[in-house]
Image (cartoon, helix red, strand yellow):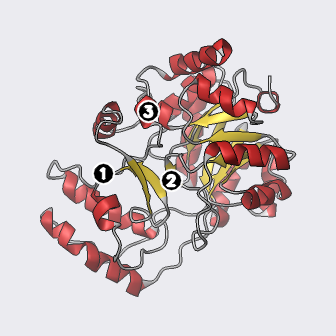
């Protein structure tokens, strides 16, 4: 038992990462039923969609689960910058027989400006709520704690982690540079600290009083055991769950994952969404995001353009502009039901 398992009421110190666009209620429920903490991501939807997703998880399990929201700084619209970005992408749309959108919109609402989402979480009372891209307001923390909810937030540096602890958040997720998906950096205008998982976990475990969860590059029980030895109370795995049948990963994403490390790699780019994120390399990384591109619109306005370009290409059967987030350990992913994967991870930990 660790500080995390005691706090959350779970058997295994394992959290399935929220992974917006890949996680599902079925995945979260299967993980929770197996004794770990399943997660759903609701930041890409509205309050009523979040309520429906929570209800769907509860139909499948009575165990604790996590609901993740985005706490990014709300986007600052800049018509000139957005027009320049669309002009830059226009030849790529044309190559797919499509026209670029006339304008871009902010497709996701930050939890910081979404009172309806707060009301849903307070009324539904999931066991855990987690935050990515920054901190909630003091009033939001008070309301969620008042509803008996455990709170977690991602940090990519000691400075961010200290802010998380000072805000009264219960658990910090130490997101190493190896992690797939969006970097949780609070301020994208500052250089990314780019700290690896092992160094970050040890640093935070030595300096903080709240439990630390390791995230990034952890794919098996041996990896979980390693971060526990460094002082973590648990591990969060995302890429390890992508090939589970309960995830909503696309056939193309699954196919790339199955290739393992043969001629395929991950990288970080902001050219897809407007925020740095790690995924399997495609033209978004090595062409669109290459040096010399115009300023990228704010997150998630830039994401609107990426989704439109992917839709145009996919309509022709071209997957060059699909978004396939994955961490550096993706070649170690195993294809099995989520509950079986949790049991396998727990067995590997015990064997160590």
Tell me which label, 1 or 3, sits earlier in the chain. Answer: 3
Q: Residue at x 27, y 62 (%)?
A: 309
Q: Is residue 114 above or below residue 207?
A: below
Q: Answer with the quarter of the image where residue 9 lies.
A: top right
The image position of residue 341, as x and y in percent, is 52, 20
Indicate the position of residue 246 as horizontal and vertical percent values.
44, 28
In screen coordinates, is 70 left or right of 135? left
The residue indicated by pointer 1 is 322
User: Which residue is labeled 3 in the image?
Assistant: 247
Residue pointed to by mark 2: 45
Work out how far the residue at label 3 is from the one at label 2, CA to CA, in angstroms: 17 Å
Q: Position of residue 180 (x, y in %)?
A: 49, 46
Q: CA distance from mark 1 to mark 3?
A: 17 Å
Q: Nearer the viewer, mark 1 or mark 2?
A: 1
Q: Farthest bottom residue? A: 80
| 56, 185: nearer the viewer | 185
């Amino acid at each position: 038992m660790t500080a995390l398992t005691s706090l959350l009421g779970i058997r295994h110190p394992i959290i399935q990462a929220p992974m917006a666009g890949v996680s599902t209620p079925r995945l979260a429920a299967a993980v929770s039923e197996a004794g770990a903490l399943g997660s759903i991501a609701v930041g890409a939807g509205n309050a009523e969609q979040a309520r429906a997703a929570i209800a769907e998880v509860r139909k499948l399990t009575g165990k604790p689960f996590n609901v993740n929201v985005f706490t990014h700084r709300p986007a600052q619209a800049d018509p000139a910058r957005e027009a320049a970005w669309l002009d830059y992408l226009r030849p790529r749309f044309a190559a797919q027989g499509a026209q670029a959108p006339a304008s871009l919109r902010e497709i996701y609402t930050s939890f910081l400006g979404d009172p309806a989402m707060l009301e849903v979480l307070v009324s539904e009372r999931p066991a855990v709520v987690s935050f990515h891209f920054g901190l909630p307001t003091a009033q939001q923390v008070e309301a969620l704690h008042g509803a008996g909810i455990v709170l977690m937030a991602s940090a990519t540096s000691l400075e961010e982690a200290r802010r998380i602890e000072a805000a009264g958040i219960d658990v910090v997720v130490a997101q190493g540079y190896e992690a797939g998906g969006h970097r949780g950096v609070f301020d994208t205008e500052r250089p990314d600290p780019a700290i690896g998982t092992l160094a970050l976990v040890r640093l935070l475990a030595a300096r903080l009083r709240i439990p630390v969860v390791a995230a990034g590059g952890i794919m098996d029980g041996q990896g979980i055991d390693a971060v526990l030895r460094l002082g973590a109370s648990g591990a969060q795995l995302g890429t390890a769950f992508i090939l589970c049948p309960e995830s909503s990963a696309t056939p193309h994403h699954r196919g790339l994952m199955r290739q393992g490390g043969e001629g395929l790699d991950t990288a970080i780019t902001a050219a897809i969404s407007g925020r740095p994120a790690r995924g399997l390399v495609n033209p978004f990384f090595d062409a669109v995001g290459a040096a010399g591109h115009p300023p990228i619109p704010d997150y998630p306005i830039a994401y609107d353009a990426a989704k439109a370009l992917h839709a145009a290409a996919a309509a022709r059967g071209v997957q060059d502009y699909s978004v396939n987030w994955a961490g550096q350990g993706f070649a170690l992913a195993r294809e099995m039901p989520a509950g079986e994967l949790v049991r396998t991870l727990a067995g590997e930990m015990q064997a160590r």
